[in-house]
Amino acid sequence: MAKYKYVIYEKEGNVATITLNRPEKLNAIVMLGYGEDYQDLMRALDEAAEDDDVKVVVLKGAGRAFCSGQDLSQVGFVYGFGTGKPGERRPSQRARLRLDRKGFEGLFRILLHPKLTVAQVHGYCLEAGLVLAMFCDITIAADDSVFGFPGQRLGFAGSGEPDIQFLALTIGLKRMRYMMLTGYRFGADEALQMGLVQEVVKRDKLQERVDTVVRALCTLPKDGIAIGKSHLHMIYDSLGVTSGLSQGYIMHTMFTNLRFEEGEWNYFKSRREGGARDAFHQKDQLWKEFEDTRK
């Protein structure tokens, strides 16, 4: 088996389990710019895809969270900007487009994976983590799970995600817009009601339930799985889900080239002045009244 630094790859019978393994970072991932952790995930997915014995891939997270989203300490730096040093040039559009496309293509390797995929979610499942979970065929969540796209509060205003079409088809257009514009977080029961997850179980029963579901899926024939996943790809194409790849990475590139006006909160400026942690909390503080009064 291949050796990985940031994921754990295990195979037992017809099941491959990929565990995101940056627990000290709540499994935050450097998706854009193709970070080493993201490359490990992609290589592990490829290993499972190419192994004819594998029928089901389980994706889970080590430690207290499934995946807390993008590593905001690295946002911007992957393009080569954000230092604030004199003479720093804005990164070219071609550099942004190349990195964004590469990152978004990786997410679609989950959506279009030839094997059955099951997300085993607990704790934080935010941003890129929520996209990973949504793009799996089945998502089973613990009752302590927290979902959402809080990174949209950096100023995206409902853009720059590869899953917009998928999300709108799953939860409805108006609910998708509200989720993206506000970046609010929500629990497992609300995610179940929306259709983002298929089952919610007690945290201490999560592994047991996933194992039961996976054993049932493994009774399906390999050829049946292959044909079913190919048919699903055709359905995604006809519904416009896969068009989110090109639309998503182009819109993300446009967002990273925003000009912030006087008085508008700028995450990158705040990070330079006080660090990523302080900037992250400033972002949520701006929305405190909204959160405190939301019902």
Image (spheres, rainbow, N blue to C red):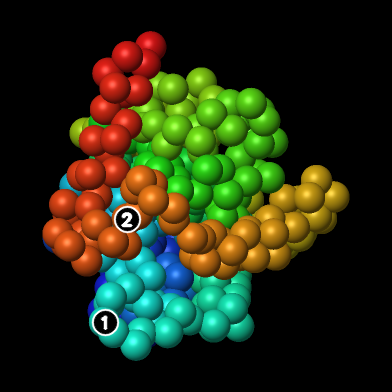
Q: In the rendered view, tell whether residue 221 sits above or below residue 203.
A: below
In 3D space, how far apart are the residues under numbered discs 1 and 2 (Cα atoms)?
A: 16 Å
User: Where is residue 200 drawn, in percent x and y?
Assistant: 39, 28
Residue type at mark 2: give it.
Answer: Tyr
- Write the residue at 49% across / 65% down: 256
- Write the residue at 32% across / 62% down: 268
Residue type at mark 1: give it.
Answer: Lys
Q: In this figure, which residue is indicated by the disc labeled 2?
A: 267
Dot 1 and dot 2 residues touching (CB under 8 Å): no
User: Where is residue 210 drawn, in percent x and y?
Assistant: 39, 42
Seen in the image, is 215 located left or right of residue 24? right
Q: In the rendered view, tell whether residue 245 sits above or below residue 141.
A: below
Q: In this figure, which residue is indicated by the disc labeled 1?
A: 85
- Write the residue at 39% across / 82% down: 80
Q: In the rendered view, tell whether residue 221 sits above or below residue 145.
A: below
Q: In the rendered view, tell whether residue 72 sits above or below residue 126.
A: below
Mark 1 and mark 2 lie on one chain; the one further toward the N terminus is 1
Q: Nearer the viewer, mark 1 or mark 2?
A: 1
Q: Secondary structure at mark 1?
A: loop
- Write the residue at 17% across / 62% down: 273
